Image (cartoon, helix red, strand yellow):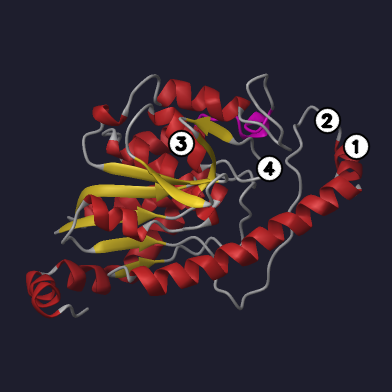
Amino acid sequence: MDITLALGGGGAKGNSHIGVLRRLESEGFNIRSVAGTSFGGIVAVMYALGNPPAMIQKIFEEVDQHHLYARDPEDGPSLLGFAGVRKMLERALGEKTFTDLQIPCAVTAVDINMGSEVILSEGKLKDAVLATIALPGVFPVQHLNDWQLVDGGVLDPVPVAAARMLSPGLPVVAVVLNDMIDNPVRGYTIPIPDIIPKTIAKRINRISLAQSLDVFLRSVDVSSRAVANFRLQLDKPDVIIRPKVQHLSILDQVVVAEVAQLGEDAVEEALPQLKRAASWHFRLGRKLFGTN
């Protein structure tokens, strides 16, 4: 049962992608290619390199989430930095490029100069990952070639079209982490390192900067839901998997194994649709008549 995957963005919610991969493998699905946006881009690249889901989970579990978004001299203007993220990527990816991948993979970003989506499928993997997760204003813009790149979720929270481009003719399974449009939007707080006393941390999260961040991120959340809904209607994945991660915020510190389990649970619910989409008669009917 061959499929191609489109892994959506969602920050900490993206740990659920690990469980999705694990359960798909255990059910006998062959993931022939994978596209990812934002956190989905990180998972997509690591999986395409040949890392099994258990190894990806181990990599994320070993990350110091308390200092993941610290700043370093390489970071440009932004609220948070990539110091901890770079350390993780250097350990997990090193200087590997897209030519080192075992299956086709692409991640998406947005060039804020041209206002267009950029599909990254060549060059250094860590450069592509930093670009696809660069949430504008929160994380530093990434300069690559002549582009100024930010998070791919700005224009395409779930890269169905990119996944279909990688493996034309295969069913596209989209893993969506965005909440439904009509659900309430939860608030956000600034990730505060543990070295700062809790009393001071509470004061920081009451100041105007933190309140402004809360408004900004909730606005991004609302916009991302709407864009995801529009793109899913336009790009028409064959199957949509929605892990129940709506209680999480993109910057939350999480127990990776618990969030990964939510991905497995979501695959369980979607199994009838998955098996139907991967069946030969469904694929033949779609090829001959363009039906789903």
Q: Earlier in the sequence, mark 1 or mark 3?
A: 3
Q: What stretch is highlighted in magenta?
A: 62-70
**The quarter of the displayed image where residue 253 is located:** top right
Taking the image as shown, residue 254 lies to the left or right of residue 30, namely: right
Tell whether label 1 touches label 2 (CB within 8 Å). Answer: yes
Residue type at mark 4? Val
The residue wearing badge 2 is 196
C-alpha span from label 4 to label 3: 16 Å
Residue 64, horizontal then vertical, whole percent: 60, 29
Residue type at mark 1? Ile
Residue 135, horizontal then vertical, whole percent: 60, 45
Circle 3 sits in a helix, a strand or a loop, which is it?
helix
**Residue 95, label in figure:** none
The residue wearing badge 4 is 138
Q: Earlier in the sequence, mark 4 or mark 3?
A: 3
The residue wearing badge 3 is 129
C-alpha span from label 2 to label 3: 29 Å
